[in-house]
Image (cartoon, rainbow, N blue to C red):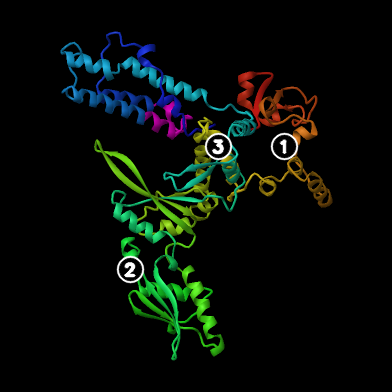
Protein backbone atom coordinates (compact mmCIF):
# COMPACT_ATOMS: atom_id res chain seq x y z
CA UNK A 1 0.00 0.00 0.00
CA UNK A 2 1.39 3.39 -0.96
CA UNK A 3 1.12 6.36 1.38
CA UNK A 4 1.41 9.99 0.37
CA UNK A 5 2.25 13.04 2.36
CA UNK A 6 0.62 15.64 0.18
CA UNK A 7 -2.21 16.27 -2.23
CA UNK A 8 -2.34 19.95 -1.49
CA UNK A 9 -2.72 21.03 -5.10
CA UNK A 10 -6.26 19.64 -5.18
CA UNK A 11 -7.16 21.08 -1.80
CA UNK A 12 -5.63 24.54 -2.14
CA UNK A 13 -7.06 24.88 -5.66
CA UNK A 14 -10.40 22.98 -5.52
CA UNK A 15 -12.89 22.77 -8.34
CA UNK A 16 -15.11 25.78 -8.74
CA UNK A 17 -18.11 24.53 -6.84
CA UNK A 18 -20.19 27.55 -7.73
CA UNK A 19 -19.89 26.61 -11.43
CA UNK A 20 -20.07 22.80 -11.26
CA UNK A 21 -22.52 22.63 -8.37
CA UNK A 22 -24.55 25.87 -8.15
CA UNK A 23 -26.61 26.57 -5.08
CA UNK A 24 -29.98 26.76 -6.86
CA UNK A 25 -31.84 28.23 -3.87
CA UNK A 26 -30.61 25.53 -1.51
CA UNK A 27 -30.03 26.45 2.10
CA UNK A 28 -26.50 27.18 3.20
CA UNK A 29 -24.87 25.48 6.17
CA UNK A 30 -23.83 27.17 9.37
CA UNK A 31 -20.13 27.03 10.39
CA UNK A 32 -20.83 24.38 13.02
CA UNK A 33 -22.77 22.24 10.53
CA UNK A 34 -19.89 22.42 8.01
CA UNK A 35 -17.42 21.19 10.60
CA UNK A 36 -19.82 18.43 11.75
CA UNK A 37 -20.36 17.08 8.23
CA UNK A 38 -16.63 17.19 7.52
CA UNK A 39 -15.79 15.31 10.71
CA UNK A 40 -18.40 12.65 9.92
CA UNK A 41 -16.97 12.10 6.42
CA UNK A 42 -13.37 11.94 7.63
CA UNK A 43 -14.25 9.46 10.38
CA UNK A 44 -15.37 6.74 7.94
CA UNK A 45 -13.22 3.58 7.60
CA UNK A 46 -11.92 4.51 4.13
CA UNK A 47 -10.38 7.69 5.59
CA UNK A 48 -8.47 5.89 8.36
CA UNK A 49 -4.79 5.08 8.22
CA UNK A 50 -5.63 1.37 8.02
CA UNK A 51 -8.00 2.10 5.15
CA UNK A 52 -5.24 3.60 3.03
CA UNK A 53 -5.51 7.31 3.83
CA UNK A 54 -2.49 9.22 5.10
CA UNK A 55 -2.73 11.48 8.11
CA UNK A 56 -1.19 14.33 6.15
CA UNK A 57 -4.01 14.31 3.61
CA UNK A 58 -6.64 14.43 6.35
CA UNK A 59 -4.83 17.33 8.00
CA UNK A 60 -4.71 19.29 4.73
CA UNK A 61 -8.40 18.69 4.09
CA UNK A 62 -9.40 19.66 7.64
CA UNK A 63 -7.25 22.80 7.56
CA UNK A 64 -8.79 23.95 4.29
CA UNK A 65 -12.34 23.46 5.57
CA UNK A 66 -11.50 25.34 8.79
CA UNK A 67 -10.14 28.26 6.76
CA UNK A 68 -13.35 28.37 4.73
CA UNK A 69 -15.36 28.29 7.97
CA UNK A 70 -13.29 31.18 9.34
CA UNK A 71 -13.91 33.15 6.14
CA UNK A 72 -17.64 32.39 6.44
CA UNK A 73 -17.65 33.69 10.04
CA UNK A 74 -15.75 36.85 9.10
CA UNK A 75 -18.20 37.56 6.29
CA UNK A 76 -21.16 37.29 8.66
CA UNK A 77 -19.37 39.36 11.29
CA UNK A 78 -18.65 42.15 8.80
CA UNK A 79 -22.37 42.28 7.95
CA UNK A 80 -23.32 42.48 11.67
CA UNK A 81 -24.76 38.96 11.69
CA UNK A 82 -24.34 36.26 14.29
CA UNK A 83 -21.27 34.17 13.42
CA UNK A 84 -22.90 30.76 13.96
CA UNK A 85 -26.66 31.13 14.30
CA UNK A 86 -28.38 31.55 10.94
CA UNK A 87 -31.80 32.77 10.00
CA UNK A 88 -33.73 32.01 6.85
CA UNK A 89 -31.86 33.15 3.74
CA UNK A 90 -34.82 35.28 2.66
CA UNK A 91 -35.37 36.82 6.09
CA UNK A 92 -33.15 39.83 5.45
CA UNK A 93 -30.90 41.21 2.68
CA UNK A 94 -27.76 40.73 4.80
CA UNK A 95 -28.37 36.98 4.98
CA UNK A 96 -28.69 36.77 1.19
CA UNK A 97 -25.51 38.78 0.68
CA UNK A 98 -23.55 36.64 3.15
CA UNK A 99 -24.83 33.42 1.54
CA UNK A 100 -23.86 34.62 -1.95
CA UNK A 101 -20.36 35.64 -0.83
CA UNK A 102 -19.19 32.74 1.33
CA UNK A 103 -22.12 30.39 1.83
CA UNK A 104 -21.74 26.65 1.23
CA UNK A 105 -24.64 24.27 0.79
CA UNK A 106 -24.69 20.63 1.90
CA UNK A 107 -24.50 19.46 -1.73
CA UNK A 108 -21.49 21.67 -2.48
CA UNK A 109 -19.64 20.45 0.62
CA UNK A 110 -20.36 16.83 -0.28
CA UNK A 111 -19.16 17.28 -3.87
CA UNK A 112 -15.98 19.00 -2.69
CA UNK A 113 -15.10 16.31 -0.14
CA UNK A 114 -15.82 13.42 -2.49
CA UNK A 115 -13.86 15.07 -5.32
CA UNK A 116 -10.78 15.51 -3.12
CA UNK A 117 -11.00 11.95 -1.78
CA UNK A 118 -11.52 10.39 -5.22
CA UNK A 119 -8.60 12.30 -6.70
CA UNK A 120 -6.46 11.22 -3.78
CA UNK A 121 -7.35 7.58 -4.40
CA UNK A 122 -6.47 7.95 -8.08
CA UNK A 123 -2.97 9.17 -7.16
CA UNK A 124 -2.04 5.90 -5.47
CA UNK A 125 0.71 3.93 -7.17
CA UNK A 126 -0.30 0.51 -8.41
CA UNK A 127 1.65 -2.57 -7.36
CA UNK A 128 4.49 -3.37 -9.73
CA UNK A 129 4.98 0.19 -11.00
CA UNK A 130 8.59 1.07 -11.85
CA UNK A 131 8.70 3.93 -9.36
CA UNK A 132 12.49 4.15 -9.48
CA UNK A 133 12.68 4.86 -13.20
CA UNK A 134 9.74 7.28 -13.05
CA UNK A 135 11.30 9.13 -10.10
CA UNK A 136 14.69 9.38 -11.82
CA UNK A 137 13.10 10.82 -14.96
CA UNK A 138 10.90 13.21 -12.99
CA UNK A 139 13.87 14.67 -11.11
CA UNK A 140 16.43 14.46 -13.92
CA UNK A 141 14.40 16.03 -16.73
CA UNK A 142 13.71 19.34 -14.92
CA UNK A 143 17.45 19.52 -14.23
CA UNK A 144 17.94 20.28 -17.92
CA UNK A 145 15.95 23.51 -17.40
CA UNK A 146 18.17 24.75 -14.57
CA UNK A 147 21.14 27.02 -14.95
CA UNK A 148 24.63 25.76 -14.17
CA UNK A 149 25.51 28.46 -11.64
CA UNK A 150 22.93 30.54 -9.82
CA UNK A 151 23.13 32.46 -6.56
CA UNK A 152 19.97 33.44 -4.74
CA UNK A 153 19.96 36.12 -2.06
CA UNK A 154 19.04 34.43 1.22
CA UNK A 155 16.69 37.04 2.61
CA UNK A 156 19.29 39.81 2.51
CA UNK A 157 21.19 41.30 -0.40
CA UNK A 158 24.64 40.65 1.07
CA UNK A 159 24.29 36.87 1.45
CA UNK A 160 23.64 34.34 -1.30
CA UNK A 161 23.00 30.60 -1.58
CA UNK A 162 24.05 28.25 -4.36
CA UNK A 163 21.19 27.00 -6.54
CA UNK A 164 20.75 25.21 -9.83
CA UNK A 165 22.63 22.12 -10.95
CA UNK A 166 25.56 22.59 -8.51
CA UNK A 167 23.21 22.58 -5.53
CA UNK A 168 21.32 19.49 -6.75
CA UNK A 169 24.68 17.78 -7.26
CA UNK A 170 25.75 18.63 -3.69
CA UNK A 171 22.59 17.10 -2.25
CA UNK A 172 22.50 13.93 -4.34
CA UNK A 173 26.23 13.26 -3.96
CA UNK A 174 26.01 13.81 -0.16
CA UNK A 175 28.93 16.27 -0.23
CA UNK A 176 30.64 16.77 3.13
CA UNK A 177 31.77 20.29 2.21
CA UNK A 178 29.21 22.45 0.42
CA UNK A 179 29.88 25.81 -1.20
CA UNK A 180 27.49 27.99 0.84
CA UNK A 181 26.46 26.41 4.17
CA UNK A 182 23.65 28.38 5.81
CA UNK A 183 21.92 28.08 9.18
CA UNK A 184 18.53 29.70 9.75
CA UNK A 185 18.22 30.44 13.47
CA UNK A 186 14.79 31.26 14.89
CA UNK A 187 14.86 33.50 17.97
CA UNK A 188 12.90 32.76 21.12
CA UNK A 189 11.96 36.46 21.30
CA UNK A 190 11.63 37.29 17.62
CA UNK A 191 9.98 40.69 18.12
CA UNK A 192 12.88 42.43 19.91
CA UNK A 193 15.54 43.85 17.59
CA UNK A 194 17.97 44.57 20.45
CA UNK A 195 17.79 40.93 21.54
CA UNK A 196 18.49 39.86 17.96
CA UNK A 197 21.60 42.07 17.83
CA UNK A 198 22.92 40.68 21.11
CA UNK A 199 22.45 37.08 19.95
CA UNK A 200 24.05 37.92 16.61
CA UNK A 201 27.16 39.26 18.34
CA UNK A 202 27.42 36.13 20.48
CA UNK A 203 27.28 33.81 17.43
CA UNK A 204 29.24 35.72 14.79
CA UNK A 205 32.96 35.08 14.83
CA UNK A 206 34.83 38.16 16.10
CA UNK A 207 38.61 38.40 16.02
CA UNK A 208 40.73 40.64 18.20
CA UNK A 209 41.79 42.83 15.28
CA UNK A 210 38.18 44.00 14.84
CA UNK A 211 37.72 45.29 18.40
CA UNK A 212 41.14 46.75 19.34
CA UNK A 213 42.14 50.36 19.28
CA UNK A 214 45.85 49.61 19.09
CA UNK A 215 48.41 46.78 19.35
CA UNK A 216 51.98 47.93 19.81
CA UNK A 217 55.31 46.66 21.14
CA UNK A 218 56.67 48.62 24.09
CA UNK A 219 60.43 48.31 24.58
CA UNK A 220 61.63 49.14 28.10
CA UNK A 221 64.85 48.58 29.93
CA UNK A 222 63.18 46.31 32.46
CA UNK A 223 60.81 43.95 30.63
CA UNK A 224 59.39 44.75 27.18
CA UNK A 225 55.80 43.74 26.37
CA UNK A 226 53.00 44.00 23.82
CA UNK A 227 50.35 46.56 24.75
CA UNK A 228 46.74 45.82 23.69
CA UNK A 229 44.04 48.47 24.05
CA UNK A 230 40.42 47.55 23.34
CA UNK A 231 37.93 49.80 21.57
CA UNK A 232 35.24 49.74 24.27
CA UNK A 233 33.03 52.22 22.43
CA UNK A 234 32.69 49.86 19.48
CA UNK A 235 32.28 46.83 21.74
CA UNK A 236 29.44 48.48 23.69
CA UNK A 237 27.69 49.70 20.56
CA UNK A 238 27.62 46.16 19.12
CA UNK A 239 26.65 44.54 22.44
CA UNK A 240 29.56 42.10 22.25
CA UNK A 241 30.19 41.69 25.98
CA UNK A 242 33.96 41.54 25.52
CA UNK A 243 36.26 42.53 28.38
CA UNK A 244 39.91 42.22 29.28
CA UNK A 245 39.30 38.90 31.07
CA UNK A 246 37.57 37.31 28.09
CA UNK A 247 40.35 38.49 25.75
CA UNK A 248 42.94 37.08 28.16
CA UNK A 249 41.26 33.67 28.13
CA UNK A 250 41.04 33.69 24.33
CA UNK A 251 44.77 34.47 24.01
CA UNK A 252 45.69 31.66 26.42
CA UNK A 253 43.54 29.19 24.43
CA UNK A 254 45.12 30.09 21.07
CA UNK A 255 47.10 27.08 19.81
CA UNK A 256 49.91 29.04 18.11
CA UNK A 257 50.70 31.68 20.74
CA UNK A 258 51.30 29.13 23.55
CA UNK A 259 51.47 31.49 26.52
CA UNK A 260 50.73 30.90 30.20
CA UNK A 261 48.57 32.91 32.57
CA UNK A 262 51.53 34.86 34.02
CA UNK A 263 52.44 36.11 30.53
CA UNK A 264 49.05 37.81 29.89
CA UNK A 265 48.09 40.47 32.44
CA UNK A 266 44.90 42.50 32.57
CA UNK A 267 45.74 46.10 33.53
CA UNK A 268 42.25 47.56 33.06
CA UNK A 269 39.01 46.38 31.56
CA UNK A 270 40.18 47.73 28.20
CA UNK A 271 43.95 47.21 28.45
CA UNK A 272 46.24 44.16 28.50
CA UNK A 273 49.97 43.56 28.60
CA UNK A 274 51.47 40.47 27.03
CA UNK A 275 54.99 39.40 27.90
CA UNK A 276 57.16 37.04 25.93
CA UNK A 277 58.20 33.61 27.12
CA UNK A 278 61.65 32.96 28.58
CA UNK A 279 63.86 33.36 25.55
CA UNK A 280 67.33 34.70 24.84
CA UNK A 281 67.81 38.45 24.96
CA UNK A 282 68.75 38.44 21.29
CA UNK A 283 65.44 36.75 20.29
CA UNK A 284 63.20 38.74 22.64
CA UNK A 285 62.26 41.43 20.15
CA UNK A 286 61.55 38.82 17.46
CA UNK A 287 59.26 36.94 19.87
CA UNK A 288 57.32 40.11 20.74
CA UNK A 289 56.76 40.99 17.08
CA UNK A 290 55.68 37.42 16.39
CA UNK A 291 53.07 37.69 19.17
CA UNK A 292 51.94 41.03 17.78
CA UNK A 293 51.38 39.50 14.32
CA UNK A 294 49.30 36.62 15.76
CA UNK A 295 47.10 38.67 18.13
CA UNK A 296 44.77 40.25 15.49
CA UNK A 297 43.69 36.74 14.40
CA UNK A 298 42.71 35.52 17.88
CA UNK A 299 39.00 34.68 18.09
CA UNK A 300 37.59 36.53 21.10
CA UNK A 301 33.85 35.96 20.55
CA UNK A 302 31.45 33.69 18.70
CA UNK A 303 31.61 30.29 16.99
CA UNK A 304 34.86 29.74 15.05
CA UNK A 305 33.15 28.05 12.07
CA UNK A 306 30.64 30.91 11.63
CA UNK A 307 31.83 33.50 9.16
CA UNK A 308 29.08 36.03 9.75
CA UNK A 309 25.47 36.40 10.82
CA UNK A 310 22.82 38.71 9.36
CA UNK A 311 19.54 39.79 10.94
CA UNK A 312 16.59 39.16 8.65
CA UNK A 313 13.51 41.32 9.13
CA UNK A 314 10.11 40.03 8.05
CA UNK A 315 6.49 41.09 8.28
CA UNK A 316 4.04 38.88 10.15
CA UNK A 317 0.29 39.14 10.67
CA UNK A 318 -0.73 38.62 14.27
CA UNK A 319 -4.19 39.45 15.61
CA UNK A 320 -5.01 41.28 12.37
CA UNK A 321 -1.93 43.49 12.84
CA UNK A 322 1.26 43.55 10.84
CA UNK A 323 4.33 43.36 13.06
CA UNK A 324 8.07 42.99 12.47
CA UNK A 325 9.78 39.72 13.39
CA UNK A 326 13.50 38.98 13.34
CA UNK A 327 15.58 35.89 12.78
CA UNK A 328 19.24 35.18 11.99
CA UNK A 329 20.75 33.88 8.78
CA UNK A 330 24.17 32.47 9.62
CA UNK A 331 26.87 31.73 7.08
CA UNK A 332 28.87 28.77 8.33
CA UNK A 333 28.53 25.42 10.08
CA UNK A 334 28.22 23.95 13.60
CA UNK A 335 24.46 23.70 13.94
CA UNK A 336 24.80 22.14 17.40
CA UNK A 337 26.57 25.21 18.82
CA UNK A 338 24.00 27.55 17.26
CA UNK A 339 21.08 25.56 18.69
CA UNK A 340 22.70 25.70 22.14
CA UNK A 341 23.14 29.47 22.10
CA UNK A 342 20.91 31.26 24.66
CA UNK A 343 18.04 33.04 22.94
CA UNK A 344 17.89 30.60 19.99
CA UNK A 345 14.88 28.31 19.53
CA UNK A 346 16.76 25.11 18.73
CA UNK A 347 13.62 23.15 17.82
CA UNK A 348 12.93 25.48 14.87
CA UNK A 349 16.47 26.25 13.70
CA UNK A 350 17.81 24.36 10.72
CA UNK A 351 20.74 24.13 8.30
CA UNK A 352 21.00 23.50 4.57
CA UNK A 353 23.95 21.14 5.14
CA UNK A 354 22.49 17.62 4.97
CA UNK A 355 25.53 15.89 6.48
CA UNK A 356 25.60 18.29 9.43
CA UNK A 357 21.89 17.77 10.07
CA UNK A 358 22.51 14.03 10.15
CA UNK A 359 25.36 14.35 12.64
CA UNK A 360 23.36 16.74 14.85
CA UNK A 361 19.75 15.56 14.67
CA UNK A 362 19.90 12.05 13.22
CA UNK A 363 19.13 10.18 10.03
CA UNK A 364 15.38 10.93 9.96
CA UNK A 365 16.03 14.67 10.13
CA UNK A 366 18.57 14.30 7.31
CA UNK A 367 15.98 12.47 5.21
CA UNK A 368 13.53 15.33 5.65
CA UNK A 369 16.26 17.86 4.87
CA UNK A 370 17.08 16.11 1.56
CA UNK A 371 13.43 16.40 0.53
CA UNK A 372 13.06 20.06 1.54
CA UNK A 373 16.36 21.16 -0.03
CA UNK A 374 15.62 19.54 -3.41
CA UNK A 375 12.08 20.96 -3.32
CA UNK A 376 13.43 24.43 -2.52
CA UNK A 377 15.82 24.40 -5.49
CA UNK A 378 13.17 23.13 -7.89
CA UNK A 379 10.53 25.62 -6.76
CA UNK A 380 12.94 28.51 -7.34
CA UNK A 381 12.75 27.78 -11.07
CA UNK A 382 8.96 27.43 -11.03
CA UNK A 383 9.10 23.68 -11.67
CA UNK A 384 6.51 21.38 -10.10
CA UNK A 385 7.56 17.82 -9.16
CA UNK A 386 5.54 15.36 -7.12
CA UNK A 387 7.05 15.18 -3.66
CA UNK A 388 6.90 11.37 -3.72
CA UNK A 389 9.82 11.28 -6.14
CA UNK A 390 11.98 13.25 -3.71
CA UNK A 391 10.78 11.03 -0.86
CA UNK A 392 11.84 7.93 -2.78
CA UNK A 393 15.28 9.40 -3.46
CA UNK A 394 15.69 10.39 0.20
CA UNK A 395 14.64 6.90 1.33
CA UNK A 396 17.19 5.33 -1.00
CA UNK A 397 19.98 7.55 0.31
CA UNK A 398 19.20 7.00 4.01
CA UNK A 399 17.75 3.47 4.33
CA UNK A 400 21.09 2.04 5.50
CA UNK A 401 21.20 4.35 8.53
CA UNK A 402 23.75 6.68 6.95
CA UNK A 403 23.63 9.12 4.06
CA UNK A 404 24.89 7.43 0.89
CA UNK A 405 25.40 9.61 -2.16
CA UNK A 406 24.52 8.50 -5.67
CA UNK A 407 28.20 8.02 -6.50
CA UNK A 408 30.42 5.00 -7.06
CA UNK A 409 31.15 4.86 -3.34
CA UNK A 410 27.52 5.20 -2.25
CA UNK A 411 26.21 2.69 -4.80
CA UNK A 412 28.78 0.14 -3.59
CA UNK A 413 27.33 0.36 -0.07
CA UNK A 414 23.71 0.39 -1.28
CA UNK A 415 23.76 -2.74 -3.41
CA UNK A 416 25.28 -6.19 -3.09
CA UNK A 417 24.61 -7.32 -6.65
CA UNK A 418 27.75 -7.67 -8.75
CA UNK A 419 26.00 -6.96 -12.05
CA UNK A 420 24.23 -3.89 -10.63
CA UNK A 421 27.57 -2.45 -9.50
CA UNK A 422 29.22 -3.34 -12.80
CA UNK A 423 26.47 -1.57 -14.76
CA UNK A 424 27.20 1.72 -12.96
CA UNK A 425 30.97 2.34 -12.98
CA UNK A 426 34.25 0.37 -13.11
CA UNK A 427 32.74 -2.63 -14.84
CA UNK A 428 35.93 -4.65 -15.30
CA UNK A 429 37.06 -4.08 -11.69
CA UNK A 430 33.77 -5.28 -10.16
CA UNK A 431 33.57 -8.33 -12.40
CA UNK A 432 37.20 -9.28 -11.74
CA UNK A 433 36.86 -8.97 -7.96
CA UNK A 434 33.60 -10.94 -7.98
CA UNK A 435 35.03 -13.77 -10.07
CA UNK A 436 38.19 -13.89 -7.97
CA UNK A 437 36.18 -14.07 -4.73
CA UNK A 438 33.57 -16.50 -6.06
CA UNK A 439 30.61 -14.23 -5.35
CA UNK A 440 27.05 -15.17 -6.31
CA UNK A 441 24.35 -12.91 -7.77
CA UNK A 442 20.67 -13.65 -7.18
CA UNK A 443 19.58 -11.80 -10.36
CA UNK A 444 16.60 -10.13 -8.72
CA UNK A 445 17.16 -6.46 -9.62
CA UNK A 446 16.20 -4.53 -12.74
CA UNK A 447 19.74 -4.04 -14.06
CA UNK A 448 20.68 -7.67 -13.51
CA UNK A 449 17.56 -8.96 -15.28
CA UNK A 450 18.19 -6.70 -18.27
CA UNK A 451 21.80 -7.87 -18.54
CA UNK A 452 20.80 -11.54 -18.32
CA UNK A 453 17.82 -11.11 -20.66
CA UNK A 454 15.15 -12.44 -18.29
CA UNK A 455 11.84 -10.83 -17.23
CA UNK A 456 12.10 -8.12 -14.58
CA UNK A 457 10.06 -8.22 -11.39
CA UNK A 458 8.11 -5.15 -12.47
CA UNK A 459 4.64 -4.66 -13.88
CA UNK A 460 3.24 -7.93 -15.26
CA UNK A 461 6.56 -9.60 -14.42
CA UNK A 462 5.97 -9.03 -10.71
CA UNK A 463 3.28 -11.73 -10.44
CA UNK A 464 3.37 -15.52 -10.70
CA UNK A 465 0.49 -17.93 -11.24
CA UNK A 466 -0.18 -20.92 -9.02
CA UNK A 467 -2.43 -23.53 -10.63
CA UNK A 468 -3.95 -25.96 -8.11
CA UNK A 469 -5.25 -29.24 -9.52
CA UNK A 470 -6.74 -32.35 -7.92
CA UNK A 471 -4.88 -34.50 -10.41
CA UNK A 472 -1.25 -35.61 -10.27
CA UNK A 473 1.60 -33.21 -10.88
CA UNK A 474 2.17 -32.93 -14.64
CA UNK A 475 4.97 -30.38 -15.01
CA UNK A 476 7.04 -27.85 -13.07
CA UNK A 477 8.63 -24.69 -14.38
CA UNK A 478 10.93 -22.24 -12.64
CA UNK A 479 8.71 -19.29 -11.57
CA UNK A 480 11.56 -16.86 -12.12
CA UNK A 481 11.48 -17.55 -15.88
CA UNK A 482 7.89 -18.58 -16.56
CA UNK A 483 5.87 -17.62 -13.51
CA UNK A 484 3.86 -20.87 -13.61
CA UNK A 485 3.86 -23.65 -10.99
CA UNK A 486 1.57 -26.67 -10.71
CA UNK A 487 1.20 -28.24 -7.28
CA UNK A 488 -1.00 -30.96 -5.86
CA UNK A 489 -3.83 -29.46 -3.88
CA UNK A 490 -3.64 -31.96 -1.03
CA UNK A 491 -0.08 -30.94 -0.22
CA UNK A 492 -1.06 -27.28 0.17
CA UNK A 493 -4.12 -28.23 2.28
CA UNK A 494 -6.23 -25.40 0.85
CA UNK A 495 -9.57 -26.91 1.82
CA UNK A 496 -11.40 -23.57 1.71
CA UNK A 497 -10.22 -22.98 -1.86
CA UNK A 498 -11.31 -26.48 -2.90
CA UNK A 499 -14.84 -25.88 -1.66
CA UNK A 500 -14.92 -22.42 -3.28
CA UNK A 501 -13.43 -23.21 -6.68
CA UNK A 502 -13.83 -27.03 -6.87
CA UNK A 503 -11.55 -28.61 -9.47
CA UNK A 504 -9.06 -25.98 -10.68
CA UNK A 505 -8.05 -22.77 -8.98
CA UNK A 506 -6.02 -19.99 -10.53
CA UNK A 507 -4.48 -17.68 -7.96
CA UNK A 508 -2.38 -14.64 -8.80
CA UNK A 509 0.38 -14.30 -6.25
CA UNK A 510 2.06 -10.94 -5.93
CA UNK A 511 5.82 -11.06 -5.61
CA UNK A 512 6.20 -7.46 -4.52
Q: Earlier in the sequence, mark 1 or mark 2?
A: 2
Q: Residue at x 27, y 18 (%)?
A: 101
Q: Which residue is mark 1?
A: 444
Determine whether 393 is above or below 429 in the image.
above
Q: Earlier in the sequence, mark 3 or mark 2?
A: 2
- For the residues labelled 1 and 2, say whether their Cβ atoms are less than 8 Å apart: no
Q: Residue furthest bottom?
A: 222
| Distance CA(mark 1)–CA(mark 2) | 71 Å
| Label 3 crowd bin: few (<14), some (14–19), many (20+), radius 10 Å | many
- For the residues labelled 3 and 1, say whether their Cβ atoms are less than 8 Å apart: no
| Label 1 crowd bin: few (<14), some (14–19), many (20+), radius 10 Å | some
| Label 2 crowd bin: few (<14), some (14–19), many (20+), radius 10 Å | some
Circle 2: element type: helix
Q: Residue at x 22, y 15 (%)?
A: 97
Magenta extent: 43-62
Instruction: Depth check: give the residue in front, 512 or 196.
Output: 196
Instruction: Depth check: give the residue in front, 81 or 208.
Output: 208
Q: Quadrant of the C terminus?
A: top right
The reply to whether the magenta stretch includes residue 45 is yes
Q: Which residue is mark 3?
A: 390
Q: Which residue is mark 2?
A: 232
**Image check: 113 left or right of 307?**
left
Circle 1: element type: loop
Amino acid sequence: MSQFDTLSIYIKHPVNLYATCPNRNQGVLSPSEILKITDERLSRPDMSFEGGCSRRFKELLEDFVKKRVKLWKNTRKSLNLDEDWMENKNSCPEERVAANISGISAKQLQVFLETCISRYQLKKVEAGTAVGAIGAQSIGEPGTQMTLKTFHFAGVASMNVTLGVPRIKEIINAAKNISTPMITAILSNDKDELSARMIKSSIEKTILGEVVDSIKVVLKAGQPYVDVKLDMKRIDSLHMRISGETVQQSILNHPKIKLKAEHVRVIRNDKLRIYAREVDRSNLQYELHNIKSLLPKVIVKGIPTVQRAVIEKKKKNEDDKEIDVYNLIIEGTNLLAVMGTPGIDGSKSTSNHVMEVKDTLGIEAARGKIITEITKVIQYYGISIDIRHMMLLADLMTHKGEILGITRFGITKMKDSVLALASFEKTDEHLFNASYGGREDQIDGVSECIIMGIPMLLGTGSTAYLILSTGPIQQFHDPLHYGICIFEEQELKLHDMRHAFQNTVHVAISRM
